[in-house]
Structures are given as structure tokens and as C-alpha cells.
Image (cartoon, rainbow, N blue to C red):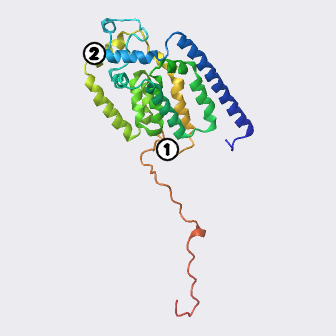
Amino acid sequence: MAGLPRVARVAILTTTGLFVVVGIAESVWLWRYVDGQHALGLDLAYFRSIAERWLDTGEFYLPRQLAGPYIVESNVDVLYPPNALFLFVPFLFLPWPLWWAVPIGVFTWSLWQLRPAPWTWPLMAAGIAYPPTISPLLYGNTNMWIAAALAAGVVWGWPSVFVLLKPSLAPFALVGVRTRGWWIALAVLILASASFGALWADYVVAIRNSSLGPAHALVTVPLLLVPIVAWFGRTRRRSASSLGWRWPGRSSAPATRSPAPSDAAPEAPHAPPGDPTA
């Protein structure tokens, strides 16, 4: 910040501050609105209910989802893949505040690891202040978990695999693809997910029959761009950034400089003619 012109500093701080104020105002208004509907944490209650139903009956998708085309009803029809149960089932037993504390903490810590440059602050503030970012947070939607997985993946690589728990956002899972840990995490996820067996066939049918198109996930993109922008503006280069790909054959060792003529050792003086040491 110190190296920027004064005009640039003022513009960055003013714009960032504006988005922060807007975000706070939106949060207050949306909190009152959602609370007025008695819907704070409604999505978490829904995720717990479908996890409990699966444990009790083995049923994850509703019969109407498998019978034929249907109009999707929010918090009724299940559009998640079976391996989302890895996230939902533990929260039948874990304290509910962790549903928010864990992803928000991971997201914040990952951005802190990158130390994004000042020019990124307004862009990140805009992505967070975006209304479709705030309202799902109040409902307890899984978007915050996906954003946390991506933010951690930008820094450490392998966590971005868990973006695949929401397949409509699968391209963002590739941010760590050039790290070995990502492939190990993917293999573990695939092996664990295979345990759901026939539920995967039901998932394909439920998605094919649904009225929901792939564009519904686009509202999450501004939030997911926040860690990407933070990586591009990172100032902490020594972080294990998964996007810092090395081209094959390029060595990571620091380059060495050939000594300049002035650095070379001086030549020994020539002996004068007739000198017995010559």
C-alpha cells in the first residue's frame, strides 16, 4: 500500500469500504427478512433430515424424482450426489455452530495465507457483498463449504477436490489438479464414494428428470472468484500455492550467475625474463 500513489490508495480504500458498508447493510436486512420467515439455518435442518432419512430407510432421493419429470421444490427434492452424505451425516451429531464456523474459518485463513495485494480488496469485497453470497450463508447452504474447499485448494491444492460435492461447480475443483495431493484426494474420494453403489444410478435419474438446468449454479460464481482473485494478487509467494504451476523440465532450483570478469580471480603476474621461477 505504501508504494501506491495517493490517488490509488484513496480509490482502493474508498471502493473497498463502500462494498463493506453495502455488505453489512445487506446482511442486516437479509437477516431480518430470513428470520421473519423463521428460516435461519433452514438448509442445515434440511440436510440433517435427508441424512437421517437415509440412515433410517436407505432412501436418499424421493420416489417422485425417480418416477419421471418433476418440478424441483426447494428443500424437498435432493439434487446432491450421494457422497454429499459425507458432509451431511456428521452434522447429525456435531454441534450446529460448526456448520458455519468451519467453512468461514477455512475460507478466511486461506485468504490470509495469500496476503492479497490492495488492488484485490475491492474485487473480493464485491464478491462477498454480492446478495446471492449473503443469503445462502444465512440459510446455511453448502455454497460456503464449496467456497472454503476452493480457497484451501488455491493454497494447498488437494482440498479443491471437495468442490466435486457440488458437481455443477466441478470446473473449480481443477485448481489443484497439478499437485500430487490433489490426485491422492481424488482417488480417496472416488473409492469412498463407490460405497454408495446403486444410489449413483438414482442420482443420474433424479438429475435427468429434474427441471433444474446447470445455469442455477452461476449465482455462486462471484463468491468462488474471491480466492482466485486473491491468488492472482498474492504477495506471499512462498505459500504452497496450487496455481503456481511449473512447466515440465523447469527446475525449481535458483539460477546461478556466472562470475563477471571483475569477479574472477586475478591472474598471477608473469615472471620477468631471466627469472629462474619462470
Left or right relative to 119: residue 88: left
Residue 242 shows in the view: no
- Residue 25 drawn at (x, y percent): 63, 20
Q: State the residue position of label 2.
A: 56
Circle 2 Cα neighbour tier, 10 Å, few/some/many (<14 / 14–19 / ≥20): few
- Residue 114 drawn at (x, y percent): 53, 40
Q: Residue at x 57, y 14 (%)?
A: 32
| Badge 2 vs badge 1, beta-carbon distance below 8 Å | no
Give the mark nearer the N terminus: 2 vs 1. 2
Q: Which of the two residues, 110 or 203, is positioned nearer the viewer here?
A: 110
Q: Residue at x 50, y 19 (%)?
A: 136
Q: Nearer the viewer, mark 2 or mark 1?
A: 2
- Residue 111 drawn at (x, y percent): 53, 36
Q: State the residue position of label 1.
A: 239
Left or right relative to 88: residue 56: left
Q: Which of the two residues, 151 or 254, is positioned nearer the viewer here?
A: 151
Q: Quadrant of residue 78?
A: top left
Q: Is residue 245 above or below residue 56?
A: below
| Count of all numbered marks drawn on residues in the image | 2
User: What secondary structure is found at the residue carrying circle 2?
Assistant: helix
- Amino acid on which disc 1 is placed: Ser
Q: Is residue 251 above or below residue 39?
A: below
- Residue 192 drawn at (x, y percent): 29, 29
Q: Is residue 103 above or below residue 39?
A: below
Q: Quadrant of residue 121?
A: top right
Q: Is residue 169 above or below residue 264?
A: above
